[in-house]
Image (cartoon, rainbow, N blue to C red):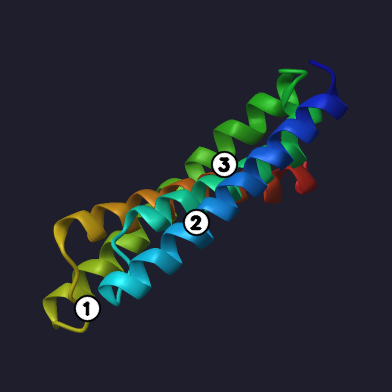
């Protein structure tokens, strides 16, 4: 797959996930009055697809620069995960946030996906 086809594929997939997120979110809000949690994962998957569409020409080459971006992106994301965990623990401890277990796991997973792939994009512009 060449770089133009790869970018187009990931952009189309990102748009589809964004459309599914809008449909499922509106259905959840209209029927239940709140978001269940899987909508966040679909939204973060959409962000992941858009990031991969941007990064595809660079990541296709799997050279030393790509490996450096991936390594440093994961390293940087680790500290954000620790920060997210501390903030969520404080919000739950002081009862400022009330979520079910499924919603909490969905929130953490979606934050992880968005953080990792957005750090790849930021680091690809830097290196």
Could you say which quadrant of the image residue 7 lies in? top right
Q: Residue at x 14, y 82 (%)?
A: 95
Q: Are marks 2 and 3 in contact (CB under 8 Å)?
A: no
Quarter in which the N terminus is drawn: top right
| Residue 126 placement (x, y as % from top left) | 77, 48
Give the label, 2 or 1, closer to the camera.
2
Label total for image: 3
Q: Are marks 1 and 3 in contact (CB under 8 Å)?
A: no
Structural distance between the alpha carbons of marks 1 and 3: 29 Å
Read off the residue under disc 1: 97
Give the label, 1 or 3, closer to the camera.
1
| Residue 15 placement (x, y as % from top left) | 66, 48
Q: Residue at x 51, y 45 (%)?
A: 45
10 Å neighbourhood of mark 2: few (<14), some, or many (≥20)? many
Read off the residue under disc 3: 73
Q: Is residue 63 above or below residue 19?
A: above
Q: Secondary structure at mark 1?
A: loop
Read off the residue under disc 2: 21
Q: Secondary structure at mark 2?
A: helix
- Which of disc 3 and disc 2 is earlier in sequence? 2
| Residue 75 placement (x, y as % from top left) | 49, 41
Structural distance between the alpha carbons of marks 2 and 1: 23 Å
């Amino acid at each position: 797959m060449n770089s133009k086809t790869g970018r187009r594929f990931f952009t189309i997939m990102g748009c589809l996930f964004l459309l599914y997120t809008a449909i499922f979110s509106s259905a959840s809000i209209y029927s239940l009055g709140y978001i269940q949690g899987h909508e966040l994962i679909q939204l973060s998957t959409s962000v992941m697809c858009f990031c991969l569409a941007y990064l595809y020409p660079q990541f296709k080459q799997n050279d030393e620069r790509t490996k450096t971006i991936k390594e440093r992106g994961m390293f940087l994301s680790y500290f954000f995960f620790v920060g997210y965990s501390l903030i969520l623990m404080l919000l739950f401890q002081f009862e400022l946030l009330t979520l079910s277990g499924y919603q909490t796991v969905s929130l953490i997973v979606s934050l992880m996906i968005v953080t990792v792939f957005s750090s790849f994009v930021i680091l690809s512009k830097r290196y």
